[in-house]
Amino acid sequence: MEESQRQKKIGSVLQQDLVEVLQGAATQGGMRGIIISVSKVKVTADLSIAKVYLSIFPNNKGKELLEGIRSNTPLIRHELAQRTKNQLRRMPHLEFFIDDSLEYIENIEKSLKREDDPIKNPDALDKRKKS
């Protein structure tokens, strides 16, 4: 089902503010050289849950950072509520996921450059995880 205009608007507002909150928290926490990007925010039809997809560079820090973000979700949600209080009545619950689409594309490109052609041998590529 396609997202409504309201869902898209709330998603974009949350996306902009989340980038500032997460990048600011990483910088204040002394984490240098880490880039946190919010690639997508999908809001449910009832506007109660926002699924946030993060791209974290470097990739090897992704899981560790995601766990830290998930454990601090109430603080992040509170900070977002303060920033968006004039735009949103209720702050949706936040669910964080790693966006692996860039890594998936990179694996396809690597496979195409190798002798193992994934078109001829589909088992050469890892199956994409759905979240």
Image (cartoon, rainbow, N blue to C red):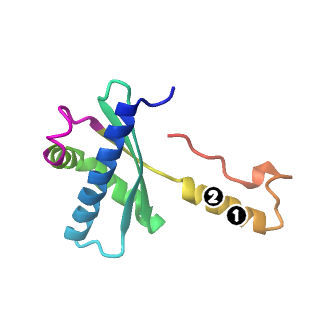
Q: Position of residue 9 (x, y in %)?
A: 34, 39
Q: Does the magenta stretch include residue 88?
A: yes
- Specify the quadrant of the image occupied by residue 109: bottom right
Q: In the displayed orientation, state which residue is furthest to the right.
A: 120
Classify mark 1: helix, strand or loop: helix
Question: Which of the 4 image quadrants contains residue 105?
Answer: bottom right
Q: How far across and down, in percent of the image, does residue 42 sit? A: 41, 38
Residue at left offset 71%, top offset 54% = 125
Q: Tag count in the figure? A: 2
Q: Residue 105 carries which label?
A: 2
- Residue 43 visible to an observer of this rendering: no
Q: Position of residue 20 (x, y in %)?
A: 26, 59
Q: Which element type, helix, strand or loop, lies under badge 2? A: helix
CB contact under 8 Å: marks 1 and 2: yes
> Which contiguous range is marked in magenta?
82-93
The secondary structure that most of the magenta stretch takes on is loop
Q: Which residue lies furthest to the front in this view?
A: 5
Q: Is residue 83 magenta?
A: yes
Q: In this view, does 6 lie above or below 86?
A: above
Task: Name the residue type under label 1.
Answer: Glu
Q: Mark 1 points at which residue?
A: 109
As drawn, 107 above or below 53: below
Residue depicted at x 24% and y 57%: 21
Image disc number at residue 38: none
